Image (cartoon, helix red, strand yellow):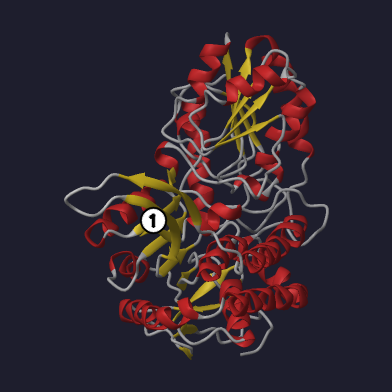
Amino acid sequence: MGSSGTADKRYRLLIGGEWVDGDEGTSPVINPATEEVVGHAPEASVAQAEAAARAAQEAFPKWWRTPPAERARLLQAVADKLRERQGDLVPLIISETGATAMVGSRMQVPVAIERFERYAKSATRSIDIPLPPSPMQATPLAAGGLIGGVVHRQPVGVVACISPYNFPVVNMAGKIAPALAVGCTVVMKPAPQDPLAVIELAEIMHEVGFPPGVINIITSSKPEPAAALTTSRNVDMVSFTGSTSVGARIMEAGAATMKRQLLELGGKGAGLVMEDADIAKAVAGIQSVWAFHSGQICTAPTRAIVHRSRYDELVAALAKVAPNLKVGDPTSMDTLVGPVISSIQRDRIESYIKAGADEGAELVVDGRRPSHMERGYYVGPTLIAGCRADMTPVQQEIFGPVVVVVPFDDEDEGIAIANGTEFGLYDYVFSQDSDRAYRIARQLRSGNVGINTAQRNHEAPFGGFKMSGVGRDGGDFGLHCYTEMQSIVWPG
């Protein structure tokens, strides 16, 4: 397999250590900025999805027993190879995803390298939990005595890792690195819109010496092969990042075989701006919806929920920022807003903007169809103010560069509006009173809360409340989620 991500490269599936063509042919991967073909992805059949799961199941016992130091060595080798390959992987990811050069160069490959290195270090560390000896009285069951115990964390088995289009390699690395570190085997299924760089990752992993069947990859533009993984008896766990509607189907599909599940689903982040907020900090956080991957990020503070005393000030500040964020060619280093992933997604975003206007909101900045971009799936920064909490664009995840602004009158109302959607992934509180901000944060029904910052802590457990999913990964929690707890006890 060559290393250049060019349109003429022949990409294949990896099943049980063998590179194979897709049974269903290929499908084009489209550059969302130019609408040109980046390359052709193999189309796996349902039978190939099942074969990949079977290969992973057959490889699991031996991989589980592989010395942790060897698992660590291989994970570190992937990180080293990714570092070597950044020069050609970053342009491929930019062309597949439409990520800007700034996001592509800083956030796409470097964060994947960090994740492999983080879990390479963890692979040799025991995550078992010793239990204090427990005095037990004699019973008809057994003699009395001091009973010792340990909670042993055993790998869950085969994990189907189904990743989203926004950060294809980073998100996949966040799933497979901890899963492999604890002794699981994996089947990778990247998003249909941009699977090529994830196939390149699989090539790297094969090249550094992962044993046959430990890592497998299938790609398809159709839902059936991924769906087959969610019902296969050879898959023990599904790790999925994507939409809530698909997550709900995966949960239902996994019930018959009691699949373990990590589901990181939609978000509708609330940015709660209190009357004592530093408006510059609030604007810096909220504008990330526009300037960070065109709002295609589930943690974005897409709902600005603002105390009425600061409402006009915040709307004016955001309205000033939006038109000055350069929308354009993602390969240019000064572009801040690139395209969204597809024409389907652009149409969806535009429908939400129209719904807001139709329902009586004020379209302060309208980013639909930027006139200077002749090609590509572009939506410019859009600001919808004067919203009510029940409006469609306030309730639904848009996944694009759209900020909605909702005023509130007192703290309890602000918290109620923040908690008033079916989502609960990542919220924000902006207040100069840290004690108050912390108290408010603890009342938000959200898996994560940022206080006066949109920065992340990658060691913190990550996941959502409500319809934003189940389970947690990140840091050591990423190791825990790919294990089963086994209690082992003995007489002292």
The residue that appears at 73% across and 63% down in the rendered structure is: 110
- Is residue 216 in view? no
Whole-percent x, y for residue 107 in the image? 71, 57
Whole-percent x, y for residue 61 in the image? 40, 80
Q: Is residue 306 above or below residue 374?
A: above
User: Residue beneath label 1, please?
Assistant: 261
The residue that appears at 64% across and 54% down in the rendered structure is: 339
Quadrant in which the N terminus appears: bottom right
Amino acid on which the number 1 mark rests in the picture: Gln
Quadrant in which the C terminus appears: bottom left
Pick the front one: 20 or 484: 484
Task: Tell me the crowding category of disc 1: few under 14, some 14 to 19, or many 20 or more residues within 10 angstroms, Cα based.
Answer: many
Pick the front one: 265 or 145: 145
Q: Is residue 210 left or right of residue 370?
A: left
Q: Quadrant of residue 104?
A: bottom right
Whole-percent x, y for residue 54 in the image? 34, 80
Q: Is residue 351 above or below residue 168?
A: above
Q: Secondary structure at mark 1?
A: strand
Q: Is residue 449 above or below residue 127?
A: above
Whole-percent x, y for residue 170 in the image? 62, 62
The residue that appears at 56% across and 83% down in the rendered structure is: 210
Q: Is residue 479 left or right of residue 311?
A: left
The outermost residue toward the right is 334
Pick the front one: 134 or 129: 134
The residue that appears at 71% across and 48% down in the rendered structure is: 337
The outermost residue toward the left is 140
- Is residue 349 in view? yes
